[in-house]
Image: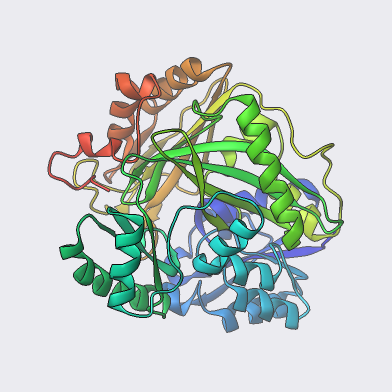
């Protein structure tokens, strides 16, 4: 087992990794920007190293500074969390070269799954259902031909993309060229490459993903699915497990396909295979995230497993403690992402937290690095807390979430708590009747339209 792990991240996920390390008896090193000097991950780590100014490019994305911090403190492994460098094959390569264990998949697998076009082709070859689409588009004319062959509407997507960037829905041929140019420009700005591809656009989809884990002995397991359909502009707001749309047979069949595909590519550590479900409840591979997800606590609540501890144990060479290719799911869990945002316009709301009270009680969990008098800086993602609840069934989980939201106090800044309260009270949400356009009804000014 590792003696010391450096956490190349900030906020609640950095604190989450520190908790796992403490339980495993592993010392921790926090890295932080000047904006995060008084953050909780700095306070609770055994050591802390400042790696630069507030801007991410000068700190949390500065590979040289992070590797130097690991070498100076004598760390033997690095946990990247999610976001920042978590899916950087280059960073994983540098860790390997520097004799530091990267707690995640191999660089080659990260590189394969990070190229959305190659990932689609690979998963199709391995038997997973994939939406009709193209390879990397070489010209506007090719885009017209492919769009005409698969039929409008279509989606333009950045090959190196994620988080909704470099994506455009095209409903008619007249929109195609302008949308293509816009998507390519955004892809260059966000990912450094203009490569985009087309795929069939599902008008009213649901977003369902499978949590997976793989060890170095060749074993891969899936831990059931999460429903992540409630989104704003392709950013998830609410996640739950299990999905109301999958029965036990579908879960077992598709989960088994996912496991066999990942065994063939030699997948190790945590990851998520994402699918879109069409109106006929048919599932299509969307992409794979080669890291721990923001919403991993939902799976932890219904499986009883600590995914972050398993990440660390697998990276240290231990075998997965799971018989077969899955585990049973118990009850129902829901997560609401509490963000520092105006609940009507979704505009960021940075500033000092004047009051902070988190709900408790049976089946309630809060993952956060915020506290009273802490400052939410304007430089990073607006997520300040994850509120997770577990109940014996979905009805109890929704009721529990509603009362927990009512008891969650954050003063001094605006948060997304009010919109979550409205969603929990919505009859269609409670009945499981929604798709990715659901959030638009809560934003009459159009801010919430995907």
Count every numbered label the image shows and give the total.
0
The residue shown at (36%, 56%) is 150
The residue shown at (50%, 49%) is 369
Q: Nearer the viewer, residue 448 or 146?
A: 146
Q: Nearer the viewer, residue 37 or 1?
A: 1
Q: Nearer the viewer, residue 2 or 254?
A: 254
Q: What is the x, y in percent for residue 111?
A: 60, 72
Q: What is the x, y in percent for residue 291?
A: 61, 57
Residue 167 shows in the view: no
Which quadrant of the view contains residue 442? top left
Residue that extends furthest to the left in the rendered view of this protein: 445
Position of 301 relative to 399 (above/below): below
Position of residue 74 in the picture relative to residue 334 (left or right): right
Residue 34 shows in the view: yes
Position of 342 relative to 33 (above/below): above
Which quadrant of the view contains residue 156? bottom left
The residue shown at (40%, 24%) is 432
Position of residue 402 in the picture relative to residue 62 (left or right): left
Q: What is the x, y in percent for residue 62?
A: 52, 79
Q: What is the x, y in percent for residue 104?
A: 68, 62
Q: According to the image, what is the colour scheme of the structure? A: rainbow
Query: Where, quadrant-wise, is the N terminus in this rendering?
Result: bottom right
Position of 306 relative to 301 (above/below): below
Q: Nearer the viewer, residue 394 or 183?
A: 183
């Amino acid at each position: 087992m590792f003696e010391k792990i450096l956490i190349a991240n900030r906020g609640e996920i950095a604190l989450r990794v520190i908790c796992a390390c403490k339980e495993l008896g592993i010392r921790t090193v926090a890295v932080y920007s000047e904006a995060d000097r008084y953050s909780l991950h700095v306070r609770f780590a055994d050591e802390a190293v400042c790696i630069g100014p507030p801007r991410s490019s000068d700190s949390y994305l500065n590979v040289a500074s992070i590797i130097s911090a690991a070498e100076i403190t004598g760390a033997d492994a690095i946990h990247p969390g999610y976001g920042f460098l978590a899916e950087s094959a280059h960073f994983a390569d540098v860790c390997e070269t520097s004799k530091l264990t990267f707690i995640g998949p191999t660089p080659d697998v990260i590189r394969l799954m990070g190229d959305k076009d190659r990932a689609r082709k690979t998963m199709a070859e391995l038997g997973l259902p994939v939406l009709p689409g193209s390879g990397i588009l070489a010209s506007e004319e090719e885009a017209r031909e492919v769009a005409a062959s698969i039929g409008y509407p279509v989606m333009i997507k950045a090959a190196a993309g994620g988080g909704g960037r470099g994506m455009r829905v095209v409903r008619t041929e007249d929109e195609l060229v302008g949308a293509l140019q816009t998507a390519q420009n955004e892809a260059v700005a966000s990912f450094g490459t203009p490569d985009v591809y087309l795929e069939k656009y599902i008008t009213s989809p649901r977003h369902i993903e499978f949590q997976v884990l793989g060890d170095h002995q060749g074993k891969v397991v899936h831990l059931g699915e999460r429903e992540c359909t409630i989104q704003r502009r392709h950013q998830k707001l609410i996640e739950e497990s299990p999905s109301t749309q999958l029965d036990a047979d579908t879960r077992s069949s598709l989960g088994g396909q996912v496991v066999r595909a990942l065994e063939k590519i030699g997948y190790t550590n945590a990851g998520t295979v994402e699918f879109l479900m069409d109106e006929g409840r048919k599932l299509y591979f969307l992409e794979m995230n080669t890291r721990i997800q923001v919403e991993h606590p939902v799976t932890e609540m219904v499986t009883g497993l600590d995914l972050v501890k398993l990440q660390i144990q697998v990276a240290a060479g231990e075998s997965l403690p799971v018989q077969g290719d899955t585990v049973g799911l118990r009850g129902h869990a829901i997560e609401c992402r509490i963000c520092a945002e105006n609940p009507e316009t979704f505009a960021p709301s940075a500033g000092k937290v004047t009051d902070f009270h988190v709900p408790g009680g049976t089946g309630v969990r809060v993952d956060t690095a915020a506290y009273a008098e802490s400052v939410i800086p304007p430089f990073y993602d607006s997520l300040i807390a994850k509120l997770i609840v577990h109940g014996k069934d979905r009805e109890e989980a929704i009721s529990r979430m509603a009362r927990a939201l009512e008891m969650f106090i954050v003063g001094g800044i605006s948060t997304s708590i009010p919109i979550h309260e409205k969603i929990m009270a919505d009859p269609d949400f409670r009945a499981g009747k929604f798709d990715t356009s659901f959030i638009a009804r809560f934003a009459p000014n159009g801010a919430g339209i995907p």
